[in-house]
Each structure stands twice: as structure tokens, then as C-alpha cells.
Image: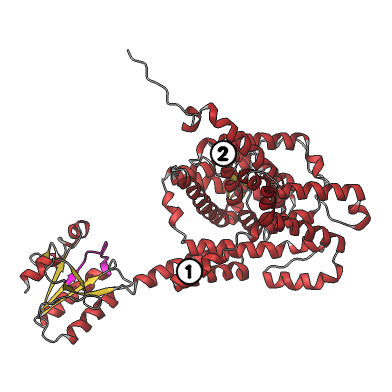
Amino acid sequence: MTQRKLPNLLPDWILAYQKNLFSGDLTAGLIVTVMLIPQSLAYAMLAGLPPEMGLYASLLPIIAYALLGSSMTLATGPVAVISLMTASALAPLAQPGSAQYIELAIQMALISGVMLLVFGVLRLGFLAHLLSHPVISGFISGSAILISIGQLKHMLGVQASGNNIIATLLDLARHLPQTNLLTLLIGSSSLLFLWWSRRYLSAALEKAGVSSRLAGMLSKLAPMLSVICFTVIVYVFKLDTQYGVSIAGHVPQGLPILSLNLPGLNAIGALWLPALLISLVGFVESVSVAQSLALKRKERIKPNRELIGLGAANIASAISGGYPVTGGFARSVVNFSAGANTPLAGIISALLMAVVIAFFTELFYYLPQAVLAATIISAVTALVDWHSLKAAWQYDRADAFSLLTTMLGVILLGVEAGILFGIALSLAVLVWRSSRPHMAVLGRVPNTEHYRNIERHDVQTVPGLVALRIDESLFFANAAAVEQKIMALINTNPDAKNMLLVCSAVNQIDATALEMLDQLEKSLAARDIQLYFAEIKGPIMDRLKNTPLGKRMKNKIFLSVHEAFLQLN
């Protein structure tokens, strides 16, 4: 009797792991940890949460994704845009930083994780393509601008708020006389250092003899250097008590206590929509980053696995007292550049973060909030995608309009309304484009079996035959436009006896378009003009043949345009 082998639950990268991969993973884990510490603290502040929650969100979520995700180099954890969306969703429900606010943030991570997990089980990975690139680019660019403006109060050392960007700017203007000049000096100095580091530090290190790769990685550690320097300055000169510089304060030491806080019906009702938007945006952003990095190594990303990996990461974040997480662009690029070969780099990073949380959080007490604000501003300003806007404007004004209006929608209406507006706009642009299909009257290229647009090529036509190629699926939005084009051609060709519709580019005909074609066939027949089809695809033919139109057209459908031209000549 043969024994049945138990399925191996370990991921493939662990089963195939080789010793020579470890040095790259260890180096990447160390470097990403140093980068992750200031970012996790800063993004928690951006989300309106205690700093330790950013640290907690950088532990178990990384391990959960490493075991269940499909990318070898994606770095998960807190990110700026998701932190902003978290704050935007929770601010109307509770006071930022309060116990209720913290509880809702944890529950939103849980709801988001369950949604992503369900989407993965249902194999809904195609959701990655639901949002067009211009909409995502506009959303992220708008969010980056919104985040930067929201951090100005920490840079100035004032208390300012507002339920939209205009109100926030006006409140900042009113509080300008109360600016803490030392806080402004610390924040602006940190921001200037980070800006210089991002542009010139790598080149300076190379001139000093450091290798190009090492110089690039070291330049990414500038935020941690800024944190250390200014924390020491505040501590030594007592800038918090002597001059009122705002600091991070007490960050609880010790690993998070694992627990599962299930949301009630009221919480689910308030959080399901923002959780869905966070899940969708986080998934699309993660897959985009993961795919771009995977292509460089000829690896493959599995969108359905990504859903499961990100879902597990968010559930792990909720269990360990964190908030919604996703794959981060900057950290993933650093992880890739630092030599990460497998998700072990992420696990090493999580273990090092656990050591920091368990023993060293007291070192963050004197960390100036202005430095955290500078870290956020430096990170998000790189996300403002003016290049895509310029390229879209030159190539396709409709895409540029989608990008620009989504960005303005986020800035003026807020993140939730902005992304919903962007999705609606993306679908509207799709319908608008499809409602104006390209159509070409065809003629034969002499001495060939090729048929091309009579307006672009020197071709031969058949007297009495009008051949129209429709370069779009036929559905409710363009049925009238197609009918109008056909009737216009008939009216300008009084000798026409045959109307041939070339359907090589038609992938679907919906009920509205079918009714239009049915009426068109009858109208043309009343004028003694015969309607013909050519190059109809098999799936459409299968559905068409059982309809009244299909039965009437049984002997009027040609396999090719060439066959139609020969028979109708």
C-alpha cells in the first residue's frame, strides 16, 4: 500500500533556497531596516496614529507577505498614500490618536486584509487593471501634494487643521505668527539635507572612491542619519523643554501583544468603503512595483498570489496592533538594489525591527516631529509624476485630462472622493472613446488580397459595393454612431447595392447593437440594398446564428474581405 505524500506548505523560494543567496538577502535586510525605522515612525504620524503602530506594522506583515506573496523583492509595510487614506477615512469617525481611532485603524486593516484574501481566493487578480495608469498616477500625485501640505504644520511647529486643502492653508496662514523658528530651522535643514542627499550624495561618495552600487545604497540611508543627528541635537541642548520643539515622546518598548479585535456591524458599515479603496489602491500600487522589478530579473508576478499575500499582511498587521499596509515603491527599489534575492531579506528586516522595538525605542524619545515631517515630504515629493502628465498631454489629451482631474479631485475633494472620481472618470473616458469608433471604407491594394483604408492608400473599389471596417466592439454606446456612419455612406453613394461590414476588430455585439443591425438590415433591404458581413469571429458567430438577424444573414457572411469582393464584384 503506497503512502500518500503530504502537500508541502512551504513557499517555493524556501524549498529552492541556496546558500549563495544569503549574503544579498542579509545586506538588503539590514539596509531596508535602517530605511524603514524613520519611515514607519513618520507614516504612523501621517496616519494620526502613535509612532509605535508604524513599527508594529513593520513586523508580522512583512513575514506574512514573504510566506504567501509572489514577488521576490517587494517590501511591504506602512506607505505614505495608504497612511493618508487611513487618516482621511478615520478623521470623521474619531479623534486622531484616541483609543477609538486606534481601534478603528486596526479594524480597517483587518477588513482590508479579509477583502484582499477573498479577492485572491476568487482569483480576482484582474482588479490590478481596473484603474488606468493616468488615474493611478493622478491619485498618487494628488495625494503626495496633499500629504506635503499637511506636514507644513509640523515643519512650522504650529497647530493647524482643516477639512480640505483650502481650509488647511488658510488656517496655516492664520497661525504663521506663532511659528516656532527653531522647529522651522530643524525641519527645513533636515529637508534640505534629504533633498541634497537624494540628488548629490551618491555622486559625492563615488568621487570619494566608493563603488557606484554602494554609494547608491548609502545615499538611501540619509533619512536615518538625519534622524540620529537631530535627535542628538535636541537631547543635548534640551530643545524640547527650553524652546518648545515638538518631539516624538515616549514610544512603548516591547513587542506587540497579539490579539484579534473583530469589528461590530457599525464599524463595518463605516469602514467597508474606505477599506475597499485602500485594498484596491494598495493592490494596484504593489503589483505595479512588483512587476516592474520582476521584469528586470525575468521573474513572474502572480496577481492572485499578490492578493493573498497582501491580504495576509494586513490581517497580520491587525493582529499585531498595526494599521493597513501594502508594498512600498521606494523601499522595494532599495531592497532590489541592495541585492535582495528572495523574501528572506524581508524576514531579516522584520527580525531586526523586532529587536529595535524590544530594546531601543527609548532612543526615539527626542526625535523632532519636524524631522519626521521632512522625511515624509522628501519621500512623497518624488511621487508627483509630472513626467507622465507631460507625456500623456503630448500623446493622448484624454489620458492627460484623466490624470490632471484625478489629481485635482484628490487635492480639492479628498482622497476617497478623488479616487472614486478617478475611477468614474476612467470608465467615462473608456465609454467615450468606444462611442467614437474608428471606421474605414476599404478598397483592394492592386494585385493583392489586402484591403486598406481608401483615405490612406491607393486602392481599387468595386462599383456598387461599400465596404466598411469597424475597429471597435459594437455596444450601446456606439451603436447609433455606427448606424449614422453607414447611412451617411449610403446617402453619398446613390449607386450602392451592397453594404459590407468588416468585423475583424469586433469582439462583441451587445443587445443594443444587435437590434440596430437588425433594423439596419431591414431598412437597407427596403431600399434594395443588401447587407453583408465579413470576418466575423467565432464566438460572435455562435451567438448570432440563432437570432432572427443571423438566420436572415445565413448566406451573407463571408470568411474574408477578399472573398466578399470577388463574389460581389
Amino acid carrying mark 2 in the image: Ala
What residue is rendered at 47% in x and 72% in y? Answer: 394
- Judge the density around disc 2: few (<14), some (14-19), many (≥20) Cα neighbours within 10 Å: many
Q: Quadrant of the image for the C terminus?
A: bottom left
Main secondary structure along the magenta-highlighted residues: loop
Judged left or right of residue 404, residue 302 is left
Q: Assess whether residue 452 is covered by the magenta stretch.
A: no
Residue 314 visible at all: no
Amino acid carrying mark 1 in the image: Ala
Mark carried by residue 392: 1
Percent position (x, y) of residue 381?
65, 61
Q: In this rendered view, identify the residue nearer to me: 381 or 130.
A: 381
Quarter holding residue 471? bottom left
The residue indicated by pointer 2 is: 340
What residue is rendered at 53% in x and 37% in y? Answer: 341
Give the extent of the magenta segment.
501-512
